[in-house]
Amino acid sequence: MKKLLASAALALMALTGTAQADGHGNYPDRPMMLMVSYGAGGATDFQARIVTMTAGNEDALGMPIAIINKPGAGGRVGWNWFATQAEADGYTMGAYNIPHFIAQSIKGGVEYSADSFEPIANWGADPAVFVVAADSDMNSMADVVEFAKANPGKLTFSGAGLFVGHHIAALQIEKAAGVKMAYIPNKKGGAGAMKAVISGEVMAGVNNLSDAFRAQEAGTVKILGVADLERNAFLPDVPTMMEQGLDVDNSSVNFRGVMVPKGTPKAIIDKLAATVPTMFENSRVQGKMKAGGSPMHIMTRDEVLAMWAAREETLKELLAGL
């Protein structure tokens, strides 16, 4: 009888170990990491710290999430690392930016594609906006186009990198207006690109609405237009590009969320997919995001998978045309 009980106990321990290993049981039982492929202070970093702040709560993951920044080359440095070196153990997560990494994979020269990652949930949708310094003579997109036509290639404007949402919006604006401007990707991402506008290093910039909203509130920039299909609730007085006669749609809207590397156990993905959206829905999280001018757009894993696929098709067509 003792042998039987001992055998049963050993079998139960083995089953428990297996369950924990494949994502059941005590997962997570230690702190987790969220890799952000942009620098500290930019919109992705700023928002990632807010949406993960309740991770340690008992009604969330019960473990804190540390933000690790791996900036460079418009996100390529971090996403290359995440696709090729990150552990697929459920403790290493990454922030995604769409259209950025999909556009970069379409253009080539990177070690990732949408198939390299497994989405968990989406927290936000941040449109691109066109900004100038607060003391600029330009007050509308018509002023921008007029200057660009009179001075081909002379209007310098910043963005977070190549083939990120900022760059896609920039290319769309140039095509729609029939002008050539000088797009200057900033090595320090969105935060660096915004500083370049404020300091006068460049004449203008394309940036995230959330970054621009905070800068406009501080009185350092003016927002001249929004690259989206309709006006944004944070900026009700700022017209869209289309309202100003420029055929620029919502292809550059920056969707942000959480993903894990391909190969992460399904049980872990399922647990994260069920839990992470509730973190985004937390009232404290939503309050801080609103105060920071950061538009939220919560989507489940299935909704994100559909969005990734749709964006890939749109971007293939768009980038071929640009």
Image (cartoon, grey):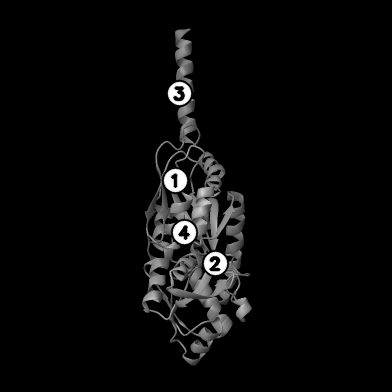
The answer to which of 10 and 167 lies nearer the viewer is 167
Which residue was labeled with disc 1? 88
Above/below status of 153 relative to 268? below
Left or right: residue 133 compared with residue 169: left
Q: CA distance from mark 4 to mark 1?
A: 15 Å
Which residue was labeled with disc 3? 13
Q: Please tell me which of labels 3 and 1 falls first in the chain.
A: 3
Dot 4 and dot 1 residues touching (CB under 8 Å): no
* Image x and y of residue 31, in percent: 39, 41
Q: Please tell me which of labels 2 and 1 falls first in the chain.
A: 1
Who's the residue at 48% across and 76% down the image? 222
Residue 247, visible in the rendered structure: no
What crowding class fits label 4: few (fewer than 14 Cα within 10 Å), some (14-19), or many (20 or more)?
Answer: many
Above/below status of 40 relative to 222? above
In the rendered structure, find residue 127 and report the number of the disc placed on it.
2
Q: CA distance from mark 3 to mark 4?
A: 38 Å
Q: Which element carries disc 1, helix, strand or loop?
A: loop
Please state, as top left, top right, bottom left or bottom right, where the C terminus lies in the image: bottom right
What crowding class fits label 3: few (fewer than 14 Cα within 10 Å), some (14-19), or many (20 or more)?
Answer: few
Which mark is in front, 2 or 1? 2
Above/below status of 138 relative to 214? below
Q: Which element carries disc 4, helix, strand or loop?
A: loop
Which residue was labeled with disc 4? 112
Who's the residue at 47% across and 71% down the image? 216
Q: Please tell me which of labels 2 and 4 falls first in the chain.
A: 4
Q: Which element carries disc 2, helix, strand or loop?
A: loop
Dot 2 and dot 1 residues touching (CB under 8 Å): no
Which mark is in front, 3 or 4? 3
Residue 34, visible in the rendered structure: yes
What amino acid type should be assigned to the residue bearing mark 1?
Ala
Q: Please tell me which of labels 3 and 4 falls first in the chain.
A: 3
What amino acid type should be assigned to the residue bearing mark 4?
Tyr
